[in-house]
């Protein structure tokens, strides 16, 4: 995709091996998805879909954060803002045209990409910290706008009456789970493609030394903008099904800090800068939280995530994957 | 604009200036850590809110004036600040990991403080009523409530003391020097890490003072810190990062704009103004309102 816009280069010699790797990845993903789907159907428990959706949504969110944060080293604190932008895009689309989940996800991707592009265009010329602060602010600005926007419910929130079931599926929960599963696979696939192509190598050069990268001809600004747009789009996509998932959405829930902290904690704990890291982190932390919400209070639950983030970045800055890879 | 609007505007400007004094105290701490030491402490507003909560606790427990309580709290907050810096230096600055892991560290600290406050005090608002809270001076048509004037003056006094310290004492000059050239400081037999630790502690002590002043002016809740991130960073960047006078001017300007907007369009819009401003400043004048490009 963005590969085409980059200066041409001789194709790497190891292409056959790489394409075999691609095939293995997609086959593996499909097999895993099939196992998950039929396993859960055999289980036949609606709560399992509920919990599965919860975990997969974080896989998408963490993967999205990793594209900008892990590869390029630009920290996006505004995950909650992008997610909520996706969720409210879905609500607004439904209010105005009656289109439901799948068009909502597409619209959310467009809105998220534009938001990311806009923020990036304004602040990416500066040092990375300014971008980070701007994303924090973006979340608050968006929240203020949504609170004052009565069309999507304002501060009272919006109800989404979801259908009882969608044709070939057992329940709507299963349908949502399957949609999120598809989104997670697409997100991880995109992240992996980014990592293995020139885009990813350019981003890594930016992370390691932006000036040097610029000097040897890496189009840093363009690459950063592509990454920010991708990151924003995927985050918004992760949020688009949220109103359908919970049936009711208010700004406080949509802009919850839990999304922002998890989006950062999961890739960093799993191992930022690799496509597998965020997946590991998301599955681990989200399952932990899902299990913990049942047993302990949600505040304590989030507190633990905060401590884990601080301890991991201090003691294991390369995350769990870093334990296995000596650099 | 008729007479009523004019009076409304005047009142908005005056209370904006008063609240600007608090913003200045909050941003002055950040001007030290972010501006001078180049440590992006996004937990600063959260620490300030924690200072506000503890001021309420200490003030009611000892039955003393909240501003005095805030002054007492500055000491443990200074120690906390030195501890945070020691950790930050050991794990991130020394390794050159400030950009990604260091930023995530402070985000985690911010989160821990905010959620910790919710768990300890509940999500409700806290506020204080010192003896002068309901006294209001009237200057012609303009109201000057002591609830805002006293903490504002207190905050300005704290900044004044800080400014004198930075200008007159050897340590203060060393803090300014460590911002410019840590190596040169080492050649003068001053340990830059020790100076930075001291300066960071000072910035956190200032956060406690700002929090104490804030809780007299308006109620605080655990999530207040989020709105203050935008305000405080906006003021600090607009003021030209490391400059205290620039910081104060920017804080007054910011307080006035925000307050006048709230007066005429309703308070629910004021965060959007704050953050919108910050985005605009970042986009068009990242060197600050009064600064020149380096």
Image (tube, rainbow, N blue to C red):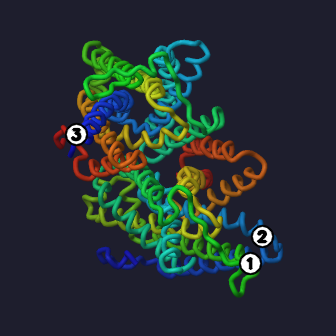
The answer to which of marks 2 and 1 sits earlier in the sequence is 2
Which element is circle 2 on?
Answer: helix
- At 39% from the left and 47% from the top, the residue drawn is B266
The x and y percentages for residue A231 are 45, 64
The residue that label 3 is drawn on is B3
Q: Badge 2 sits on which subunit?
A: A
Mark 3 crowd level (few <14, some 14–19, many ≥20, 10 Å Cα): few
- At 60% from the left and 37% from the top, the residue drawn is B124
Q: Nearer the viewer, residue A15 or B176?
A: B176
Q: Nearer the viewer, residue B234 or A34?
A: B234
The residue that label 1 is drawn on is A171
Q: Badge 1 sits on which subunit?
A: A
- At 27% from the left and 23% from the top, the residue drawn is B139
What is the spatial separation of the Cα atoms under label 2 and label 3, in whole angstroms? 64 Å
Camera sees residue A240: yes
Specify the farthest residue to the left.
B292
The x and y percentages for residue B37 are 35, 31
Query: Residue A148 appears in which quarter of the rendering?
Result: bottom left
The residue that label 2 is drawn on is A46
2 and 1 marks in contact (CB < 8 Å): yes
The correct choice, above or below, for B64 with respect to A98 in the image is above
Labels 2, 3: front one: 3
What is the spatial separation of the Cα atoms under label 2 and label 1, in whole angstroms? 8 Å
Which element is circle 3 on?
Answer: helix
- At 41% from the left and 68% from the top, the residue drawn is A113
The x and y percentages for residue B162 are 33, 19
Does residue A123 appear left or right of residue B111 in this picture?
A: left
Camera sees residue A325: no
Residues at marks 2 and 1 on the same chain: yes
Does residue B212 appear left or right of residue A48 in this picture?
A: left
Mark 1 crowd level (few <14, some 14–19, many ≥20, 10 Å Cα): some
């Amino acid at each position: 995709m963005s590969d085409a816009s980059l200066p041409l280069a001789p194709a790497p010699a190891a292409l056959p091996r790489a394409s075999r790797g691609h095939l293995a990845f997609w086959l593996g993903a499909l097999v895993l998805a099939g196992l998950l789907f039929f396993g859960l159907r055999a289980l036949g428990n609606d709560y399992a879909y509920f919990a599965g959706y919860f975990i997969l949504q974080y896989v998408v969110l963490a993967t999205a954060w990793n594209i900008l944060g892990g590869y390029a080293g630009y920290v996006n604190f505004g995950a909650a803002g992008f997610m909520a932008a996706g969720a409210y895009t879905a609500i607004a689309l439904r209010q105005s045209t009656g289109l439901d989940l799948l068009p909502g996800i597409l619209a959310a991707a467009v809105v998220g990409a534009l938001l990311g592009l806009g923020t990036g265009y304004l602040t990416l010329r500066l040092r990375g910290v300014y971008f980070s602060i701007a994303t924090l602010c973006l979340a608050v600005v968006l929240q203020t706008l949504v609170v004052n926007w009565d069309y999507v419910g304002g501060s009272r929130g919006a109800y989404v009456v979801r259908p009882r079931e969608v044709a070939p599926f057992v329940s709507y929960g299963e349908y949502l789970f399957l949609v999120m599963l598809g989104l997670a696979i697409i997100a991880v696939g995109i992240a992996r493609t980014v990592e293995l192509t020139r885009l990813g190598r350019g981003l890594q050069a930016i992370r390691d030394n932006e000036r040097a990268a610029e000097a040897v001809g890496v189009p840093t600004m363009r690459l950063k903008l592509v990454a920010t747009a991708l990151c924003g789009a995927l985050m918004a996509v992760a949020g688009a099904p949220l109103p359908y998932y919970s049936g009711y959405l208010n700004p406080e829930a949509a802009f919850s800090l839990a999304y922002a902290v998890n989006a950062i904690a999961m890739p960093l704990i799993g191992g930022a800068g690799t496509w597998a890291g965020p997946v590991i982190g998301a599955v681990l932390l989200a399952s932990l939280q899902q299990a913990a919400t049942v047993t302990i209070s949600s505040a304590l639950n989030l507190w633990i995530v905060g401590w884990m983030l601080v301890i991991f970045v201090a003691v294991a800055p390369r995350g769990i994957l870093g334990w296995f890879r000596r650099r | 604009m008729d007479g009523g609007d004019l009076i409304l505007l005047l009142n908005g400007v005056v209370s904006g200036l008063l609240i600007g004094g608090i913003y200045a105290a909050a941003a002055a701490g950040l001007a030290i850590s972010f501006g001078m030491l180049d440590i992006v402490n996004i937990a600063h507003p959260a620490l300030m809110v924690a200072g506000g909560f503890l001021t309420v606790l200490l003030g009611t427990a000892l039955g003393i004036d909240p501003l005095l309580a805030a002054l007492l709290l500055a000491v443990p907050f200074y120690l906390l600040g030195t501890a945070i810096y020691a950790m930050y230096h050991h794990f991130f600055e020394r390794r050159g990991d400030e950009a990604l892991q260091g930023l995530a560290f402070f985000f985690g600290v911010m989160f821990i403080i905010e959620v910790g406050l919710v768990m300890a005090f509940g999500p409700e608002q806290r506020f204080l009523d010192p003896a002068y809270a309901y006294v209001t001076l009237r200057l012609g048509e303009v109201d000057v409530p002591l609830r805002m004037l006293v903490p504002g003056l207190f905050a300005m006094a704290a900044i004044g003391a800080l400014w004198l310290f930075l200008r007159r004492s050897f340590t203060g000059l060393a803090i300014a020097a460590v911002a410019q050239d840590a190596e040169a400081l080492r050649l003068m037999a001053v340990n830059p890490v020790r100076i930075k630790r001291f300066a960071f502690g000072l910035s956190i002590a200032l956060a406690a003072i700002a929090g104490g002043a804030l809780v007299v002016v308006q109620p605080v809740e655990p999530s207040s810190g989020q709105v203050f991130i935008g305000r405080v960073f906006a003021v600090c960047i607009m003021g030209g990062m490391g400059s205290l006078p620039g910081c104060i001017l920017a804080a007054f300007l910011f307080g006035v704009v925000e307050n006048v907007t709230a007066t005429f369009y309703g308070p629910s819009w004021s965060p959007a103004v704050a953050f919108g401003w910050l985005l605009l400043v970042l986009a068009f004048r990242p060197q600050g309102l009064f600064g020149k490009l380096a």
